[in-house]
Each structure stands twice: as structure tokens, then as C-alpha cells.
């Protein structure tokens, strides 16, 4: 029912197989346990290895570097089906794919690719991405982390905040100002002296994922850990484009799960001697939910075609991320109303999705920042610059 415009007919056989396998994984391995982890604010770390075994870490990474070699629609479908289970699980996967594996493959040396990519793609190693700082979220160009040259050695100082996977990550792709003042990407490894990853606790959102800080206290960074092509804020933003693309697909999965839960519940919940699905207001909610999901699916599919052709622009990705996450939040809230009081309990996924989406609407560019990105494209006047 959620493929109302028969988008399946636009998908390749490989895409359909990818979606089927990941959907089955979500139904069998994520959905039965995820509420328990979310209620306890615990991260199911074993899932990382399972993702690797399923081949969904390094989805678009070439096979000769340990990846699956799928196209971007395949990657989008992976994100959709994992987030149908939980946004936190999709966040873990998105960071590994788009923000760790992708920049190493895109900007790294051949030695770095051989060292890191196979272990990241297999799930043996977990990665994180250090761009956001405590005082610089929406303005990465203002970053204060510094890489200096001390007696011929590179030394890193500063911190990053709100970093998914950080407390458990084996590898961190980090961005800082180099001695020439340019933003520089580099690879850090757990165990480097002065490099710590304290966890951020007491979250009401993404409770089944692990979030933390990256703290650099005179961390010595070997020159071979710098990514030579990862220079300038634009390089970091290319990574964000890939992550935002996955989010645009993933949010659809959360919306589908809320919608399908509401449809099933409304058919079984009896009030005034008939199912609440028989009431006009319930039908209005369901019809509008399906309409918005369908529109988001079409946006995501078309964006995927453009990504495959190398034509997708930053502003197109911003539109998709902004629209689809806002859509998913609205669907979750409408579904919660249909379920009434039952919408807030862990027996149903609605409130967990809703709380998760409150983070998704903010990270990888806030809802308003993406609006301003589009506004700048339309008018030629960037409102977020002085």
C-alpha cells in the first residue's frame, strides 16, 4: 500500500533484492529488540558486525575495497529499510557509509584505503566523523580545532561535539585548520595519546545509538594520516551531501513504519461499535499521510537517479532532506494521534520514531539551514552570511 505510485517498477532487480534482504533483516533482527535498547538508552553494538555481514557498510564502495558496489538508489533503499526499524540504527550505518568510508575512498591515499576500508566495510571497525564543534554547528567554516606543526610534527588540539558513534569508534575522520589556515581532513585512531571520546548521555532522542565528543589534547598526528585531497570546507560538505542524501531516504522508512502501524491499529481499535478506521477524520489523516509519503518517495527516487548520473546538486539534496524529514515528523505525530494513549508506549514504535526524528530534523543541517540554502539558490543572496 505504501508503493502507491508503483515506484517498484522503476527499480532495478538488484535494487529490489537489496531492499528485500534489508527489510527482512530489519523485521527479524532490529524490530524485535530495538524498543528494549531504546528504553535502556543502550547501543546494540553487535549490530555493526551484522551490518558488515549483510554487506550494507560500504554499500556504494567498489568491491575491490571490500564494498558492495551498489548504486545510490540501492544505498537509499538500505537507509529506508534500516530506519523503518530505527533512526539510530540508520545513523550508525549512515556515518560509516557516507562520512567515514566515502571520504577515505574519495580523498585518501591508496595506503589509507587499503588499511581502513576493508575493516570498516566488514564492520570489524566502527568509524565516526568529527566536524561539528561545541560553538560551531551550522557554521563549520568557523571551526576552532587546530592542527599545528611543532618541531616538525603535526599536533592537533580542539574538540568536536554531537558525534554519532564517537564513544566506540575505532577510526575518526576529523576536520581541523591546518598550519596554513585551511580546513584539512585527517584520520585518527583510538589509542592515540591525548585523543578521548567521552559519551553524551541523558538523550531523549536516538537513545539506541551512541553519541559523544572528540577531544584532542596535543594529539600527535602522523603525516601519513592526513588525507591529501581533503582540503577546504567544500571537501567536508561533500561528505555531508552524501549523508543528507541517505537521510532523505531513511526518513521515509520511519514514516512508513508509523503509517503502517496506524493503518493496522485503526482497523482493530473499536469505538462507538465500529473500527476507528471508519471515521472520516481517521481516513483524512491516513490519506494525507500516504500522499506525503508518496511525494517523498518520488523525490528520493528522482534524486537517486541524479546521484547515479553524477548530477545531483547540494541544493537538490537539501530540498529532499528538509522535505522528507519534516514529512516523517508530521506522519509520526498524526499516527500518534490515531493511536491515542497507546501511541506513547513502547509496544508501538510511534513515540520512538517521533523522538528520533527530532534529532534527524536537526543534524546534517537544520531544517532552517536547508531552507536558507534553498533561498540562496533561488535569490542568489546567501542570508546566512554577513
Image: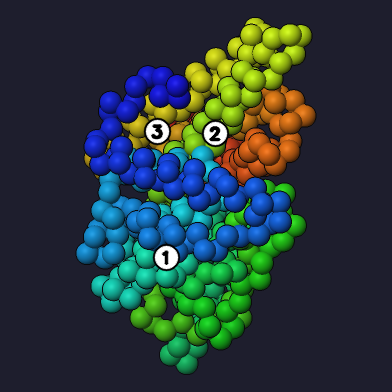
Residue displayed at 77% across by 29% down: 341
Q: Quadrant of residue 303?
A: top left
Give the structural element (helix, strand or loop) at label 1: loop
Residue displayed at 66% across by 71% down: 198
Going from N to C along the chain, the mark reached first, 3 or 1, is 1
Residues marked 2 and 3 touching at CB (< 8 Å): no
Q: Quadrant of residue 372?
A: top right
For the residues carrying marks 3 and 1, which lies nearer the camera in this image? 1
Give the structural element (helix, strand or loop) at label 3: helix
Quickly name the residue at label 2: 257
How many other residues sit within 10 Å of disc 1, few (<14), some (14-19) or many (≥20)? many
Q: Is residue 163 visible?
A: yes
Give the number of callouts. 3
Q: Position of residue 222 (x, y in %)?
A: 42, 84
* Label 2, label 3: how far apart the Cα atoms are: 17 Å
Q: Position of residue 69 (x, y in %)?
A: 26, 53
Residue displayed at 55% across by 63% down: 45
Going from N to C along the chain, the mark reached first, 2 or 3, is 2
Q: Position of residue 16 (x, y in %)?
A: 30, 37
How has the structure been colored for display? rainbow
Q: Position of residue 304 (x, y in %)?
A: 33, 37
Quickly name the residue at label 1: 123
114 sits to left or right of 204: left
Amino acid at each position: 500500500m505504501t508503493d502507491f505510485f508503483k515506484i517498484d517498477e522503476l527499480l532495478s532487480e538488484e535494487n529490489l533484492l537489496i531492499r528485500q534482504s534489508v527489510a527482512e533483516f530489519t523485521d527479524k533482527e532490529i524490530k524485535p529488540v530495538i524498543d528494549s535498547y531504546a528504553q535502556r538508552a543502550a547501543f546494540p553494538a553487535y549490530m555493526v558486525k551484522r551490518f558488515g555481514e549483510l554487506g550494507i557498510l560500504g554499500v556504494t564502495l567498489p568491491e575491490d575495497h571490500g564494498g558492495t558496489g551498489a548504486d545510490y538508489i540501492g544505498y537509499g533503499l538500505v537507509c529506508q529499510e534500516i530506519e523503518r526499524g530505527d533512526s539510530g540504527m540508520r545513523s550508525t550505518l549512515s556515518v560509516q557509509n557516507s562520512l567515514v568510508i566515502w571520504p577515505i575512498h574519495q580523498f585518501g591515499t591508496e595506503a589509507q584505503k587499503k588499511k581502513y576500508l576493508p575493516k570498516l566495510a566488514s564492520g570489524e571497525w566502527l568509524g565516526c566523523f568529527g566536524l561539528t564543534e561545541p560553538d560551531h554547528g551550522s557554521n563549520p567554516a568557523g571551526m576552532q580545532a587546530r592542527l599545528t606543526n611543532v618541531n616538525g610534527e603535526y599536533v592537533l588540539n580542539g574538540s568536536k561535539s554531537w558525534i554519532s558513534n564517537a564513544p566506540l569508534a575505532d577510526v575518526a575522520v576529523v576536520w581541523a585548520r591546518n598550519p596554513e589556515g585551511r580546513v584539512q581532513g585527517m584520520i585518527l585512531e583510538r589509542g592515540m595519546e591525548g585523543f578521548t571520546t567521552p559519551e553524551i548521555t541523558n538523550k531523549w532522542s536516538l537513545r539506541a545509538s551512541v553519541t559523544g565528543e572528540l577531544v584532542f589534547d596535543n594529539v600527535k598526528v602522523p603525516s601519513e594520516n592526513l588525507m591529501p585531497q581533503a582540503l577546504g570546507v567544500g571537501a567536508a560538505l561533500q561528505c555531508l551531501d552524501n549523508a543528507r542524501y541517505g537521510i532523505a531516504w531513511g526518513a521515509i522508512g520511519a514514516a512508513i513504519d508509523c503509517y503502517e502501524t496506524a493503518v493496522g491499529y485503526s482497523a482493530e481499535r473499536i469505538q462507538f461499535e465500529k473500527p476507528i478506521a471508519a471515521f472520516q477524520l481517521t481516513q483524512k489523516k491516513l490519506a494525507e499521510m500516504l500522499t506525503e509519503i508518496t511525494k517523498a518517495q518520488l523525490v528520493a527516487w528522482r534524486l537517486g537517479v541524479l546521484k547515479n548520473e553524477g548530477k545531483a546538486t547540494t541544493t537538490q539534496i537539501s530540498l529532499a532532506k528538509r522535505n522528507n524529514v519534516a514529512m516523517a515528523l508530521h506522519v509520526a505525530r498524526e499516527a500518534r494521534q490515531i493511536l491515542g494513549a497507546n501511541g506513547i508506549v513502547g509496544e508501538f514504535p510511534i513515540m520512538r520514531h517521533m523522538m528520533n526524528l527530532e534529532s534527524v530534523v536537526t543534524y546534517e543541517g537544520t531544517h532552517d539551514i536547508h531552507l536558507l540554502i534553498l533561498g540562496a539558490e533561488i535569490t542568489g543572496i546567501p542570508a546566512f552570511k554577513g
